[in-house]
Amino acid sequence: MKACILKSVSPIENNPLELTEVPKPECGPGQILVKVSVCGICRTDLHVIEGELPRQVMPIIPGHQVIGRVVQLGAGVTNIKPGDRVGIPWLHQTCGECEFCCNGKENLCENAIFTGWLVNGGFAQYISAPAGFVYQIPEVFSDEEASPLLCAGIIGFRSLRLSGITGESPGKRLGIYGFGAAAHIAIQVAMHWGVEVYAFTRDERHRKLASDLGAAWSGGSDDEPPLKLDSSIIFAPAGELVVSALKALKKGGTLALGGIHMSTIPPLDYQLLYHERTVRSVANNTRQDGIAFLRIAAEIPIKPRTQVFDLAEANSALNALKHDAIRGAAVLKMEV
């Protein structure tokens, strides 16, 4: 099969992904083999490729927003049948035995395996995955629309929840810092819940997208919003935004950090945290997050904005992502 292989970490400007022929993956007990239709690209893929995440496994096939059809079942698989359309997300597998798995916090599993980082991912024509960790995809979404829901969407949804924004939050004011794939999906959920959204992004094209999606206000990353905010989410991997975001929060407000990697956060004046402001990270997701999000995404329905690239263009797509040239989410199609 064709796949994009990363043999060693490197800046994406060096075009380190190599499109090559590799063996089709095996389908072991409890697993399914999926013929990949599309795979979304994500800033986390950049962090893997450029070595910003530890525990590197090399060589590796990146990609963790995978949509495809089941072509083979491993022994013991009964909940899925050949031909089913499924999504394979970032959370590839957990141990099911540690204190976190046993207490509803499998996103914090001590021995978790992540797709496209610690096991081969979806920048390939085929992928195998544990049957218990894949999602059935609502029919309302095309393959291209469904792909960014599997990470950008699910993480955006969990970030909303951890920021204090829920379906019982109409009228609250939410700040979103960085307006890429996750933000452009999260705003649609927030708007559905009657939340006012204030978008902070350095790119004029992204401010335009935020406005098109219903943001009450959009401005630069360090701009002061016209009103104090109840909650905020930072999706950009820029630690210096924590200072700006805290300044914009109301007393008692919550700031959620939605990325897996962030540059160094500057020293904080205690007055930014005083009055019970909260800063919390968002680490991965549980399967229940994904189930709940896909349900509400289909009800709304979410309309992801996508830009489609051929698998052979993976390096170009990731370069565009790094330099804020993607409006919405980028998706790789596997026909080569």
Image (spheres, rainbow, N blue to C red):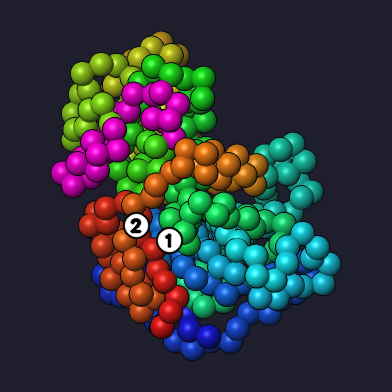
Location of residue 295 (image quadrant): top right
Label 2 sits on what residue type?
Answer: Thr
Residue 7 seen in this snapshot:
no
Tell whether 254 sits left or right of 66. left
Residue at the extreme front: 140
Location of residue 236 (image quadrant): top left
Q: Nearer the viewer, residue 19 or 82?
A: 82
What's the distance in space between the residues labelled 2 and 1, CA to CA? 7 Å
Residue 175 seen in this snapshot:
yes
Q: In terms of secondary structure, where does tag 2 sit?
A: strand
The picture places residue 257, in percent across and down from the top left corner, at: 43, 37
The picture places residue 127, in percent across and down from the top left corner, at: 59, 73
Label 1 sits on what residue type?
Answer: Glu
Residue visible at 57% across and 75% down in the picture: 35
Is 205 a magenta residue? yes
Q: In terms of secondary structure, where does tag 1 sit?
A: helix
Residue visible at 47% across and 46% down in the picture: 153
The picture places residue 139, in percent across and down from the top left corner, at: 55, 54
Q: Nearer the viewer, residue 148 or 244?
A: 148
In the image, the segment drawn in magenta is 189-214
Q: Are marks 2 and 1 in contact (CB under 8 Å)?
A: yes
Position of 248 relative to 64 (above/below): above
Q: Residues within 10 Å of mark 2 (few under 14, many from 20)?
A: some
Tell whether 68 sits left or right of 33. left
User: Residue 144 got which mark?
Assistant: 1
Tell whether 184 sits left or right of 279. left
Q: Nearer the viewer, residue 121 or 195?
A: 195
Location of residue 190 (image quadrant): top left
Query: Where does label 2 land, which residue?
Result: 306
